[in-house]
């Protein structure tokens, strides 16, 4: 993923409160990211649910309803005073669990482009998205077209 600066930027982009972290915490979040990826790579719903359950066991401390900072009621999966690593683990594990319930265990995937490492949430109408972006899908289509043209010569 990157160093402290890069991870800090991601945390700020996703509005993680008190995102300041040490190099050790950044390393812990990189390890957590590998664990998260396993959810997206799971071959089936049962495996996906098992991977999310493992994250919930390790990453959450309970469920709390809160209205901090004038926000509408929402769930937290760890106490508010937990460190940034604990809060990121909790929000990602809890968020994946909630999404899996709403999406019936589907709609999480890895980009089909062989050189892309991006994972994604499929928000398409039919739930059959294979690429993280139109750019990756277009790149693969062009590559297939060129390969077919070379083979046909």
Image (tube, rainbow, N blue to C red):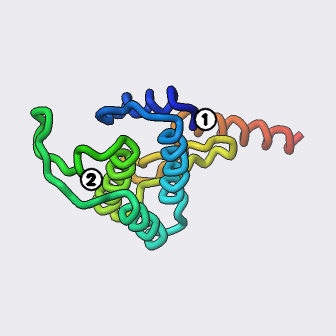
Q: Is residue 28 left or right of residue 116?
A: left
Mark 2: few/some/many CA within 10 Å (<14, 14-19, 20+)? many
| Residue 9 drawn above or below residue 32 | above
Residue 46, quarter of picture: bottom left
**Which secondary structure, mark 1?**
helix
**Front tag of 2 and 1:** 2
| Residue 67 drawn above or below residue 89 | above
**Residue 116 appears at what percent x and percent y?**
63, 41
Residue 118, quarter of picture: top right
Residue bearing the label numbered 1: 138
Q: Residue at x 44, y 27 (%)?
A: 9
| Residue 139 drawn above or below residue 151 | above
In the image, farthest residue toward the bottom: 46
**Residue 25 appears at what percent x and percent y?**
47, 41
Report the quarter where the C terminus lies: top right
Tell me how many marks there are.
2
**Which secondary structure, mark 2?**
loop
Contact flag, marks 2 and 1 (Cβ < 8 Å):
no
Q: Residue at x 13, y 36 (%)?
A: 71
Q: Nearer the viewer, residue 117 or 8?
A: 8
Residue bearing the label numbered 2: 78
Q: Is residue 21 left or right of residue 6?
A: left
Q: Nearer the viewer, residue 119 or 131?
A: 119
Q: Residue at x 37, y 55 (%)?
A: 93
Q: Residue at x 36, y 62 (%)?
A: 56
Residue 40 marker: none
State how far apart marks 2 and 1 are (Cα): 41 Å
**Residue 4 appears at what percent x and percent y?**
51, 31
């Amino acid at each position: 993923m990157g160093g402290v600066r890069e991870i800090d930027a991601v945390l700020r982009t996703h509005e993680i409160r008190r995102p300041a972290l040490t190099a050790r915490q950044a390393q812990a979040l990189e390890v957590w990211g590998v664990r998260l990826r396993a959810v997206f790579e799971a071959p089936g719903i049962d495996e996906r649910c098992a991977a999310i359950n493992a994250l919930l066991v390790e990453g959450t401390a309970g469920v709390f309803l809160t209205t901090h900072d004038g926000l509408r009621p929402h769930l937290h999966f760890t106490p508010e005073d937990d460190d940034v690593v604990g809060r990121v683990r909790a929000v990602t594990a809890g968020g994946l669990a909630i999404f899996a319930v709403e999406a019936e265990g589907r709609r999480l995937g890895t980009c089909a482009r062989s050189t892309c490492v991006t994972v994604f949430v499929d928000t398409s109408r039919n739930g059959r998205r294979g690429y993280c972006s139109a750019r990756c899908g277009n790149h693969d289509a062009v590559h297939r077209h060129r390969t077919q043209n070379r083979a046909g010569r």
